[in-house]
Image: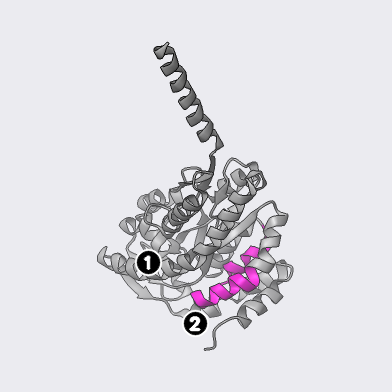
Amino acid sequence: MKTLKAGLLALALMAGISHANAQEVQIKFAHVGEPDSLFADVSQEFAKRANEKLAGEAKVVVYGSSQLGGDSELLKKLKLGTVDLALPSTVMSSVAPQFALFEMPYLIADRDHMARVRDEVVRPQLYPVAASRGYHIIGVWENGFRQITNNVHPINTPADLSGIKLRVPQGVWRVEMFKSYGANPSPMALSEVFVALQTGAMDGQENPLVQTYASRLQEVQEYLSLSDHIYTPAFVTAGMSWNRLPEHVREVLQQTAMEMESYALEQGAKLDEETLAKMRDAGLQINKVDRQAFIDASQSVYDKFIKDVDGGQEMLDKVRELQPAS
């Protein structure tokens, strides 16, 4: 009898554990950043904070390093509901043309400016556009100010890019911009870039410093040209599965994603400074570009944006209105 009671008790405990586990919702959060990238840092901190608040009701599990796919694939998985959250950046311009606002060279002056643009342009204007395409943005983090690396020579002016095979992210606008500078740009998933540079299939690439360093691209590049040509935000984005999550879980995720916005900007600034020193130590030859020469060469990209994007001129005017006084 004692043995039978002990067996029944064990079965009951196992059933209880199984039931408890079944109640916990797992939230898959995927991104393309490598370990030690800003994407990895902020998404892991987000998961830690959210999971503390959710206390077993649900658990955010982060999949970095393109484990669940590149940016374009992750957008599809959001639509299917097989990924719950992702962190797209440049690729959002393929979702809706209005997101090409962040493809305009030298538009975002600094991170304080970006915070104002986030609150007064992205939330009221771009969130609804994304929602109309089936994507629910819950926060705006950072990818960062982008710089150019290559194996041919230092880039000082747009003319120095002539003929250079340059990897760019997926999306048409970066291709347009670098073509206007004379480069030969090719969209490519971040996970493929190291080998492309190592084999000479590509001469160079452009990315925020932290993304470049975390992807070890400094190991297969010689020159780093500090251009700050574009600032790219990263959008914490949900898809088909969002409305299937319990209401309290959605509230926690949204609250925590917004809580992380200032953290992302602060970490981005800190890591830029630290990473530049690491790049120098890695032996890259570093120079600053002729900023005005690049600004002067960028007008055609602005003209296309104004022509092709509904409300483009008004968005540009609003962003410029929010720029800090010089």
Question: Which-is-in-front pick, marks 2 and 1?
Answer: 1
Q: Which residue is mark 1?
A: 271
Q: Position of residue 311 (x, y in %)?
A: 73, 71
Dot 2 or dot 1, earlier in sequence: 1
Q: Residue 107 location in percent, x, y? A: 56, 76
Residue at image location 52% in from the left, 89% down from the top: 326
Q: Residues within 10 Å of mark 2 (few under 14, many from 20)?
A: few
Report x, y in % for residue 325: 54, 88
Task: Please indicate, yes or no, whether residue 182 appears anywhere in the rendered image.
Answer: no
Is residue 186 in view? yes
Was residue 255 drawn as part of the magenta stretch in this picture? Answer: no
Q: Residue at x 50, y 61 (%)?
A: 184
Q: Residue at x 52, y 56 (%)?
A: 186
User: On the image, numbered disc 2 is attached to which residue?
Assistant: 292
> Which stretch is magenta?
96-122
* The N terminus lies in quadrant: top left
The three-letter code of the residue at mark 1 reads Leu
Measured from the top left, where is residue 25 in percent x and y? 55, 41
Question: How far is mark 2 from mark 1, CA to CA?
Answer: 26 Å
Tell me where residue 77 sits by quadrant.
top right
Secondary-structure class at tag 2? helix
Residue lying farthest to the bottom in this orientation: 326
